[in-house]
Image (cartoon, rainbow, N blue to C red):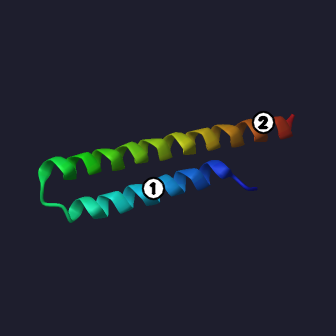
Amino acid sequence: MYDPGSDKAAEYRVQAEYIRTMARQISLNEPRNKLLGAARHLDLLADEEERKAWHAASQSASKSEA
């Protein structure tokens, strides 16, 4: 079953890792911390997308069992 929510979550995680890689290359604290904050935000967005996808899948499974 195609699940666009998990694709979105995966993209957020890829972007977060890319940002963390960039942050490791920056020696200035403030810009590095801002990048790391952005990466954490993307991780939270990915978590939320996964929760939505899980909820939608469980709702769909409940309806198909009825």
Task: Kindly identify the amino acid type of the residue bearing the numbered disc 2.
Answer: Ser
Q: Quadrant of the C terminus?
A: top right
Question: Within 10 angstroms of label 2, few (less than 14), some, or many (20 or more) residues?
Answer: few
Q: How many marks?
A: 2
Q: Is residue 14 left or right of residue 51?
A: left
The residue singled out by tag 2 in the image is: 62
Q: Residues within 10 Å of mark 1 (few under 14, many from 20)?
A: many
Q: Are marks 1 and 2 in contact (CB under 8 Å)?
A: no
Which residue is rendered at x = 27% and y = 50% of the image?
A: 36
Q: Nearer the viewer, residue 50 or 12?
A: 12
Going 20% across and 53% down the picture, which residue do you hit?
Answer: 32
As helix, strand or loop, the secondary structure at mark 1 comes to helix
Point out the tag, 1 or 2, that comes first from the N-terminus: 1
Q: Quadrant of residue 59?
A: top right
Percent x, y of residue 51? 56, 40
* x then y, percent, for residue 2: 73, 56
Real-space Cα separation, disc 1 to disc 2, in angstroms = 29 Å
* Vertical relation: 40 (above or below) 21: above
Is residue 29 left or right of 65 when viewed as pictured? left
Which residue does the image show at 53% across and 56% down from the upper left? 10
* Residue 38: x %, y % from top left: 34, 46
Q: Nearer the viewer, mark 1 or mark 2?
A: 1
Question: Which element is circle 2 on?
Answer: helix
Residue at coordinates 13% horizontally, 51% vertically from top-left? Answer: 29
Three-letter amino acid code at the position of disc 1 = Arg
Q: Which residue is mark 1?
A: 13
**Quadrant location of residue 1?**
bottom right
